């Protein structure tokens, strides 16, 4: 069956640098307000930002550590594996906007954002 895709070192480094770009006060954790601010800069709607943050913040202490950040991505990768079955369901769900921005999309925007500023 689906074996979890191992994240290579380069990918982890990349995530780590994104994490540090988001962690503007260098506290070692991304706080809700930091995340919200960055999402605003990336033009992510605040309800999506909340959803992404809650998803990454696995122990619900209101901050995202590097560990949570990286494992959030790992989960995302694994979920992608069995996404094809759910794709059809989305059509019938109609007007309600589910959580359409996944962390990976948002963070990749962050990557470009960071790359542009250096
Ligand atoms: Ca946390």
Image: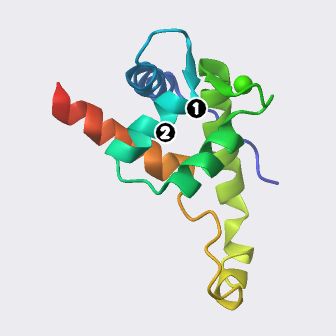
Name the quarter showing ligand 1. Answer: top right
Q: Indicate the position of residue 7 as horizontal and vertical percent values.
A: 58, 32
Residue pictured at 43% horizontal, 26% vertical: 22
* Image spot of residue 34 (x, y percent): 48, 28
Query: Hey, which quadrant is residue 88 in on the image?
Result: bottom right
Give the class, few, some or many, for how many residues have Cα within 10 Å of label 2's Cα (few <14, many ≥20).
many
Q: How far apart in space, not on screen, are marks 1 and 2 (Cα)?
A: 6 Å
Considering the image in quadrants, where does the C terminus appear? top left
For this view, does 40 lie left or right of residue 49? left
Q: Is disc 1 in contact with disc 2, using a CB cutoff of under 8 Å?
A: yes
Q: Is residue 92 above or below residue 65?
A: below
Q: Is residue 3 above or below residue 21?
A: below
Quarter of the rendering occupied by the N terminus? bottom right
Rendering quarter of residue 67 = top right
Q: Along the horizontal axis of the image, is 39 left or right of 49? A: left
Q: At 73% from the left edge and 41% from the top edge, which residue is drawn?
A: 4
Which residue position holds label 2? 36
What residue is pinned by disc 1?
32
Name the residue: 43% across, 44% down: 39
Q: Secondary structure at mark 1?
A: helix
Tag of residue 108: none
Disc 1 CB within 8 Å of nearest ligand 1 atom: no
Q: Does residue 5 show up?
A: no
Residue at image coords 71%, 85%: 93
Where is residue 72? Give x, y as percent. Answer: 66, 37
Judge by depth and name the residue closer to the eye, 81 or 25.
Answer: 25
- Color theme of the render: rainbow
Whether residue 108 sits left or right of residue 50 in the image: it is left
Q: Position of residue 55 (x, y in %)?
A: 70, 43
Compare residues 59 and 70 and report the one nearer the observer.
59
């Amino acid at each position: 069956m689906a074996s979890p895709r191992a994240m290579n070192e380069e990918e982890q480094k990349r995530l780590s640098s994104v994490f540090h770009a988001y962690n503007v006060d260098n506290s070692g954790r991304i706080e809700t307000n930091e995340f919200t601010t960055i999402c605003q800069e990336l033009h992510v709607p605040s309800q999506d930002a909340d959803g992404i943050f809650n998803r990454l913040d696995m122990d619900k202490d209101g901050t995202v550590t590097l560990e949570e950040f990286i494992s959030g991505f790992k989960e995302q990768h694994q979920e992608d594996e069995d996404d094809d079955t759910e794709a059809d369901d989305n059509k019938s769900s109609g007007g309600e906007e589910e959580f359409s921005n996944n962390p990976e999309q948002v963070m990749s925007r962050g990557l470009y954002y960071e790359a542009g500023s250096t």
